[in-house]
Image (cartoon, rainbow, N blue to C red):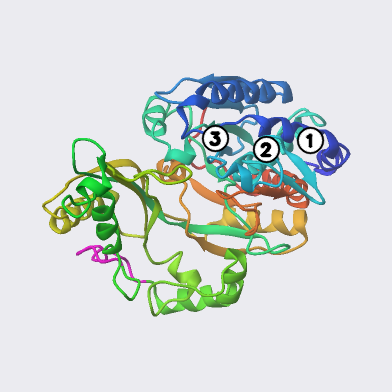
Amino acid sequence: MDVRSPLAYASASRSRFLSELMDFVRFPTVSASPSRSDDLRRCAHWLASHLRGIGLERVAALETSGHPVVYGEWMRAPGRPTVLVYGHYDVQPADPVAAWHVPPFEPAVVGADLFGRGASDDKGQVFAHVKALEAYLGTLGRLPVNVKCLVEGEEEIGSPSLAGFLAGHERLLTADVLLASDTRFLARGRPAITYALRGSLSLELGVAGPGRDLHSGVYGGAVHNPLQALCEIVCGLHDAAGRIAVPGFYDAVRPVVPSERAYMTRVGPGDAQMLRDAMIRRGWGEAGYSLYERTTIRPSLTVTGLPGGYPGPGLKAVIPSVATAKIDVRLVPDQRPAEIERLMRRHVARVAPATVRTAIRTLSSSRPVTVDRRDPVLRSAAKAYRRGFGASPVLLRLGGSIPAVGLLQGRPGGSTVLMGFGLPDDGIHSHNEKFHLPNFYGGIATSIWFLSDVGRCHAPRGGASS
């Protein structure tokens, strides 16, 4: 299929595309916040209306046990493969809001970047594919492949409703190619196809002591402070060398062959680049591995929050009755979330002092993902990047997790393509998140080229149907 008209359409529509993306980013779709549920629902219906407006069919904001899933399709290319485009419209909390240069949900263009929460993760990236579909349907009136779009509203909290939703819509979501863009480039001007993601396990560790908060002058020295006890437990989760100190934690870790480690050293970010991207001077972690390896082929355990005690201004002389640690564990093949959860529970029960009570709650989990680097569909992705960005992509492992990919992957004969358009300095999950607009426009062109090449070079394999 001739791509000249869609490419010209996309180029001529950049100003409108940017305006529409800004409308998308304005929705404060923080899935972790119950107070934002109405905003998530409004955004889902806005996106469904948008997909309907560009020409997709059977569009709906479908109910789940949590936030809606937006679905749309175009299945009018008989004999051509079906591509399932995945993304998410929910975002991370914007705290600390005071650290933002612009209000997080009032997107603003500064230079060549669009600032706003969700601009890169993941609204801008999934919207690039939406605009590629519009460019085809708005010019040629058809697509080179069959397409299904699935955009969920819970990825940032571990996609807790997605498994149940998929079980009820298994036939609807069959496809030959799973296409997800929720990853990043190696560096500016250096595209990347991701071939591995770590799994995840999110836990909440609670420590309880007295039945109510106590005066620290009256009871200090006589009562074990739950916040102190929690910190003692947390400090014992790593040893002095940076290894996770939970017995059995590494037992199932699959070793990476020397040839792959050599490849990663050759094409991946070096320690100096990793430090610059993180804006720190010295790294930390498990000895014997580069910083890139520590974040990809090795598991990690991170304390992401320690709610407890009095966090307000000034002083409050109090021993808190409870304290909590939020713990983010990243897993590698062949670690299983359920087994790591069991090991964590056993470890905490063993080391917790008898003066407090502990409890662990599992918030979410997902399995690690690997993609066959020899899959011919990845060659189509590489060609599309060369045409869209003028540069060949590298194959990267990333340390993040996308629960939906693990759930959707593994269909008979299906391919998985993780084409990222973000940059390492986009500030995702941090303040001042941005999306580099040349990557937005280049992503649209890349998607146009990719769909064309898949339709021309690949036959249906997964038995996908409407």
Residue contact at pointers 2 and 1, CB within 8 angstroms: yes
Segment colored magenta: 244-255
* Residue to which mark 2 is pinned: 127
For mark 3, give the secondary structure: loop
- Type of amino acid at the residue the image marks with label 1: Phe
Q: Which mark is residue 330?
A: none
- Type of amino acid at the residue the image marks with label 3: Asp
For mark 2, give the secondary structure: helix
Q: Is residue 353 shown above or below 364?
A: below
For mark 1, give the secondary structure: helix
Tell me the distance, in whole angstroms, between the alpha carbons under discs 3 and 1: 20 Å
* Residue 213: quadrant of the picture: top left
Q: Is residue 178 shown above or below 252?
A: above
Q: Earlier in the sequence, mark 3 or mark 1?
A: 1
Q: Is residue 209 shown above or below 298?
A: above
Residue 162, image x, y percentages: 42, 32
Residue 51, image x, y percentages: 67, 25
* Residue to which mark 1 is pinned: 17
Q: Which mark is residue 90?
A: 3
